[in-house]
Amino acid sequence: MTTFTERLRDRRLDAAPTRAQSIAFGASGFPTQLMAQTFSAFIVYFYVSHLAVPAGWVAAAMIAHGILNAVLNPFVGAISDRLRTPWGRRIPWIGLGIVPLVVAFALVWMPPELPTAGLIVWFLVVVAVYDIAYVVVVLNISALFPEIFRTTDERARGNVPRQIFAILGMILGTAGAPLLYASPIGWPGMAIVLGTVCLAFLVWSFAGGMVERRVPEASVAAPLPFGMQMRYTFANRAFVPYVIGSLFIQTAIAVILAALPFYVRYSLGAPEGEGSILLGAIFVTAIPAIVLWSAVVRRTSPRTALLWSVAVFGLSVLGFLAPTSILAAALVGVAVGIGVGGLLQLLEVVLAQIIDEDAVRTGHRREGAYFGVNGFIVRGSVVLQAIVAAWVLTASGFDAALGDAQPDAVDGGIRLMLAVIPVGFVALAWICFFLYPIRTRDLAAPSPAS
């Protein structure tokens, strides 16, 4: 009778994944985005407003969280590429990390009764565990994508369920969490409910969709040292324009999300809660748009489809300059959602193509290194977003103490932050992706995983 570890070791992918495997793998997008969105949207509010921790201490803790998350990405990615076990390179990381990830996520919202200093220590320790587990699990799941799906057609189809699950996770993270913590179960109940849901989805995805390819022993090259991995990665002529373009795209999206609450209240004069209408218009539209862009990339090439989606996104965002009502802004949001769907679908497809090209050149498949360095660099979007928001709001004369009676310049500044500045970043991204040198659909002979 075979043991569970033996069954796990013997479960390998030798051909294209089945539909059931693709859906199960894609299901991982739901819990990972649900946790990330809930954490980013409500963690400051919970510790400052509910637990009365001084905002300055929470801000310092969040900076530490951001630095740790960014630094972990390239190191975890490089170590994962070097790992050799009977169960593969990625599966052990994911299998060992799922439970700590979910438990740490739940404990963030369930601190014991402690003084302020104790709460800060709790936050730092638990969030550090959450960060480490999140990077370990999510980076290795991402690294499996180019290995499971090997052609542009497979990747275009295989990424559809993953991104749809991810959007549903984003929606539940922003809309569902407040309904739970405002109910009688409170914050601890919310943590238990969301943690249980996340664990169920991750176990389903791990058991049904996360599988590595069988590699003949003769084809397995010796792992590269960390320093050589980084040199090869930053010397890649395709990766450099791609990752800079990704940084600009992520910055544009971050600036838009930061500007939307100000836009709703101070430019449109609508209640703050109606911001969910704009977010809903964008993300709900992005779901069918993912399917549309999947068809586009299967008929063109990753580079061409990405250029088109960036152009659609940038031109649509300019539409936010005109509306004077929530309904008109929501219609613009529908157009923006079409472009967002393309970005969600195509960025990882293009990165997978870069990994294929690197494997042909170097003889190593280094998904972990590329996803890790990409994660490290795009974290810079948070810094750029903060700089843009602070500069625009200060320059326009925004003063929170004035309430809704802001100077006339504030409306113009907010529209500049929501539309014009993001389009500038999108234009820079389009130039980067135009310089992306791989113009074919697929490489002639993708190398096996090493």
Image (cartoon, grey):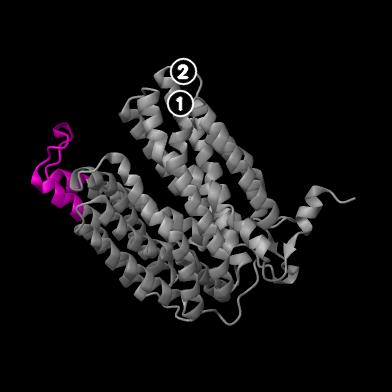
Residue type indicated by callout 1: Val
Of pointers 2 and 1, the one earlier in the residue sequence? 2
The image quarter in which residue 208 lies: bottom right
List x then y, in percent, for residue 35: 50, 42
Q: Is residue 350 left or right of residue 48?
A: right
Residue type indicated by callout 2: Leu
Q: Nearer the viewer, mark 2 or mark 1?
A: 2
* Magenta region: 390-416
Name above or below for residue 339 compared with residue 169: below
Specify few, some or many for label 1: CA neighbours under 10 Å numbering under 14, 14-19, or 20 or more: few
> Of helix, strand and loop, which one carries label 2?
loop
* Residue 24 on the magenta segment: no
Q: Residue at x 49, y 56 (%)?
A: 372
List x then y, in percent, for residue 73: 49, 51
The residue identified by callout 1 is 121
Query: Can residue 352 be seen in the rendering of this structure?
Result: yes
Instruction: Please state which of residues 397 and 66 is positioned toward the viewer in this rendering.
Output: 397
Specify few, some or many for label 2: CA neighbours under 10 Å numbering under 14, 14-19, or 20 or more: few
Q: Is residue 392 left or right of residue 166?
A: left
List x then y, in percent, for residue 321: 20, 58
Q: Determine which of the numbered discs, if any, sits on residue 114 in the image.
A: 2
Whether label 2 touches label 1, CB < 8 Å:
yes
Q: Residue at x 67, y 53 (%)?
A: 91
Query: Can residue 210 be seen in the rendering of this structure?
Result: no
Q: Residue at x 41, y 41 (%)?
A: 40
List x then y, in percent, for residue 323: 21, 56
The image quarter in which residue 161 lies: bottom right
Name above or below for residue 35 compared with residue 356: above
Q: Is residue 313 left or right of residue 449?
A: left
